[in-house]
Amino acid sequence: MSLDEVLAEFRDAGALLEGHFILSSGLRSAVFLQKMAIFSEPPRTERLCKALAAVITARFGKVDIVVSPAIGGIVPGYETARHLEARAIFVERDPGGPFTLRRGFSIPAGQRAVIVEDIVTTGLSARECLASLQAEPGEVVGAACLIDRSGGRGEIGLPLVSLVTLDIPAYPPDALPPELAALPPVKPGSRVMTKA
Ligand SMILES: O=P(O)(O)OC[C@H]1O[C@H](OP(=O)(O)OP(=O)(O)O)[C@H](O)[C@@H]1O
Ligand SMILES: O=C(O)c1cc(=O)[nH]c(=O)[nH]1
Ligand SMILES: [Mg+2]
């Protein structure tokens, strides 16, 4: 899928939001990609995740398991796994806690897993997901996301592929441009922030 096609899916779904957003990393941004507007439409989700599955296969070869960080990663993880003919599992957390693999999920010895995220901003959530899988016998060979908004600077500790890479500005809370500081901030994601 081209950059324009991916962005058209987000635009047409009403997933390109403007305002003042507190991101999962604690950074602030004037742009938020509301992926749940995409995931509430199965055909749109299917088109994007089918394309992501092709990118994953081209980069990582045969994958047995897709593992995603809850909540945002669960739907694209499942749909991408469907196209990869792989198993779909996820890590989740108690509010404020670390990601954990529960529900009998595992990465057995000899199996190749890929982390599938919805959006990568700093790579923090994908890194935390990877850290939660260290004791698993199988191998985590890479990571993938629909949109990498880090400009390619997100650090995961794994090779990362995406449908598109964007460079969307994000700021520490004490370094906001005046037009952003003038707007009331909202925090859309599920991570519990100890300080905002
Ligand atoms: O690369 P990062 O800086 O970690 O930012 C991206 C992460 O932020 C969002 O998750 P969030 O923690 O907001 O919760 P959600 O998955 O429930 O939306 C998104 O789903 C990614 O997981
Ligand atoms: O960094 C984030 O928390 C984030 C950014 C974004 O555009 N969309 C999203 O769901 N999370
Ligand atoms: Mg998330």
Image (cartoon, rainbow, N blue to C red):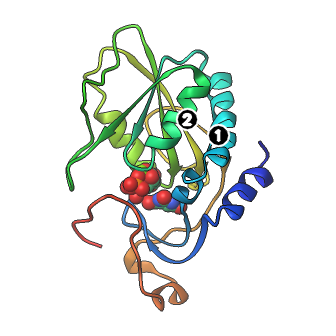
- The Cα–Cα distance between marks 1 and 2, rounded to whole angstroms, is 7 Å
Q: Residue at x 68, y 28 (%)?
A: 54
Q: Secondary structure at mark 1?
A: helix
Identify the residue shown where x is 43% and y is 79%. 175
Which residue lies most toward the top here? 110
Question: Where's residue 141, x and y in %?
Answer: 48, 23
Q: Quadrant of the C terminus?
A: bottom left
Q: Amino acid at mark 2?
A: Glu
Residue 155 is left or right of residue 25, and the answer is right
For residue 112, above or below residue 89 = above
Q: Is residue 26 above or below residue 2?
A: below
User: Badge 2: how crowded within 10 Å, few (<14), some, or many (20+)?
Assistant: many
Label 1 close to label 2 by CB (< 8 Å): yes
- The percent position of residue 174, horizontal first and vertical second, equals 38, 79
Q: Nearer the viewer, residue 43 or 105?
A: 43
What is the number of the mark on residue 79?
2
User: Is 191 displayed left or right of 21 in the figure?
Assistant: left
Q: Nearer the viewer, residue 42 or 14?
A: 42
Where is mark 1, residue-wise? Answer: 46
Q: Secondary structure at mark 2?
A: helix
Percent x, y for residue 151?
Answer: 61, 54
- Lower sequence index among marks 1 and 2: 1
| Residue depicted at x 56% and y 60% | 37
Is label 2's Cβ within 8 Å of ligand 1?
no
Above-or-below relation of 111 to 176: above
Instruction: Find residue 60 and report its horizontal and vertical position in percent.
Output: 59, 21
Q: Is residue 65 left or right of residue 168?
A: left
